[in-house]
Image (tube, grey):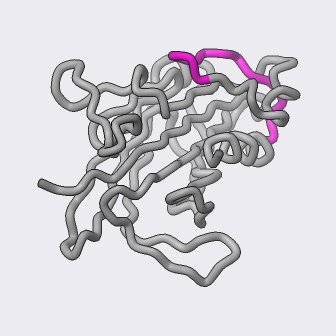
Amino acid sequence: MLSNLLRDLRWRVLGVAGVIALMSGGVGLASSPVADAAVASPGVLQGFGTNTGGFTGGQGSQVVVGPGGGNPACEGTFVLPTANVSFSTIPLGNNNYELQWHLVLNAVSQNYLGPMVDGNMTVAGVNGYLINPPYSPHTELANYDFHSSMSTYQRIGSSYIGTLHADDMVDFGWAFKSVFDPNRGAYADTSCQILPSS
């Protein structure tokens, strides 16, 4: 499953041993051998957003799901234990879409990491294929809105360049490190589906 691979890769890239378990719902990191080894000592705040229990849509408490019925739509805000990630999709015509996102670390993460963080999208995928992450690493204030967008992508290890379409599954994994205490980190993962415009 791509989400397990995303978690494994993030742990390798993040390079911080340990987890402070601040997870919502029943999604667990324990299914990953790399993460199992990391659970031994504290150091990383974790958040995972594929469960609809951690998702709040734009209106009320209604959960928006994809056509398959089980995948959160790439619309609205994912409320994770470490951050809030807001998505919106823009139709570009011919069933092509642009996905926009905004990630803001929550107060728990900001307090834990301190005033400055190194933020990076360490891993990304579309429809089960790893892609070159569409976000460059940079250092910002901990309350910064880490934002960007994507309409095209390139698969890792391939010359294939794709365009986002309706029903595509998109997975993102972000990692953050404290600038002042490099032994402290946080991550946020999301998995969502592009819905066709109505």
Q: Nearer the viewer, residue 128 or 135?
A: 128
Q: Name the spot of residue 92 as percent of width and height, x first.
A: 21, 70
Image height of 99 relative to 13, above or below: below
Furthest toward the left, the residue is 198
Residue 80 image offset from top left, x and y in percent: 47, 25
Looking at the picture, does residue 161 appear above or below residue 26? below
**Foreground of the two, 65 or 11:** 65
Q: Classify residue 58 as left or right of residue 30.
A: left
Image: 142 above or below 193: above
Judge from the rendering whether residue 191 lies leftward or rightward of residue 27; answer left or right. Answer: left
Q: Main secondary structure of the magenta part?
A: loop
**Picture coordinates of residue 155, whole percent (x, y):** 59, 71
Return the x and y of residue 171 as percentages of the image width and height.
52, 49
For image coordinates 40% across by 39% down, the residue present is 71
Q: How many marks?
A: 0
**What segment is highlighted magenta in the picture?**
15-27
24 within the magenta span: yes
Q: In which quarter of the view is residue 87 placed? A: top left
